Amino acid sequence: IYEELVFVRTLTTDTKGESIFHVLKDYYIQKAIPLSNIISVATDGAPAMVGRYRGFISYLKQNLSGVLAKHCVIHRQHLVAKNLSENDVSTYAQHLNALYSDFETRFEDVLTMVIPPWIINPYGDIEETDVIIQEELTELSTNEELKVQFKNGYLQFWLQNNISVSYS
């Protein structure tokens, strides 16, 4: 997705949806840009923008039936921030801290888990590994087909059926 500001113009008459639409349409005509290039529009939710019959979006949809109209996320955040009390923020913070503590306790083993280097790179240095694992890694490192597959990433590599069956 690529987002870019198209233009900025002053509304000389009024801020009605029809006027906004005509300013946009005139700009697109002047620059030889087809209106069909517009696939989505984000607005602040003001009646001049989203009014059912005379809002900017209704005029735009008369010319582009498939255009998507969305309420701008930034305006939603502003509305939430405007109506959110200090007590609400404190309650949310307490809940998040409790969730963090719970996850830290439940998944302690994941946080302290040590992954041997040969899991990340079975073709690297194997001197510090167990003798049995060294033999399997030596066998693995001579397989040219598996070396190519390892280039797709170690997670995909170890999840292959033939690897999990042969080297488990």
Image (cartoon, rainbow, N blue to C red):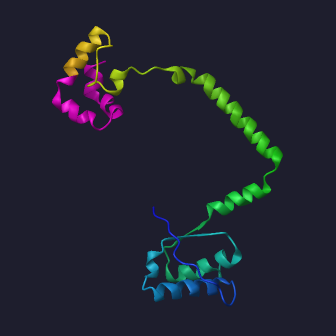
6 sits left or right of 95 in the view: left
Q: Quadrant of the N terminus?
A: bottom left
Q: x, y (%) of residue 138?
A: 21, 18
SS assignment for the magenta stretch, majority: helix
Task: Name the image quarter holding residue 47.
Answer: bottom right
Residue 123, percent from left and from top: 26, 25
Residue 33 is drawn in which quadrant? bottom left
Q: Nearer the viewer, residue 59 or 25?
A: 25
Residue 136 located left or right of residue 66: left
Residue at 65% in and 80% down: 55
Q: Is residue 90 above or below residue 28?
A: above
**Rendered image quadrant of residue 72:** bottom right
9 to 131, vertically: above or below: below
Give the percent coordinates (x, y) of residue 44.
66, 69
Q: Residue at x 27, y 33 (%)?
A: 150
Left or right: 2, with 7 as reference point: left
- Tell me if residue 156 is in the magenta stretch: yes
Q: Residue at x 50, y 69 (%)?
A: 4
**Residue 101 sits above or below residue 68 on the image:** above
Question: x%, y% of residue 24?
Answer: 55, 83
Q: Which residues are magenta?
A: 141-168
The residue under the point 55% across, 80% down is: 60
Task: Tell me the quadrant of the picture where the C terminus can be found.
Answer: top left
Q: How many marks?
A: 0
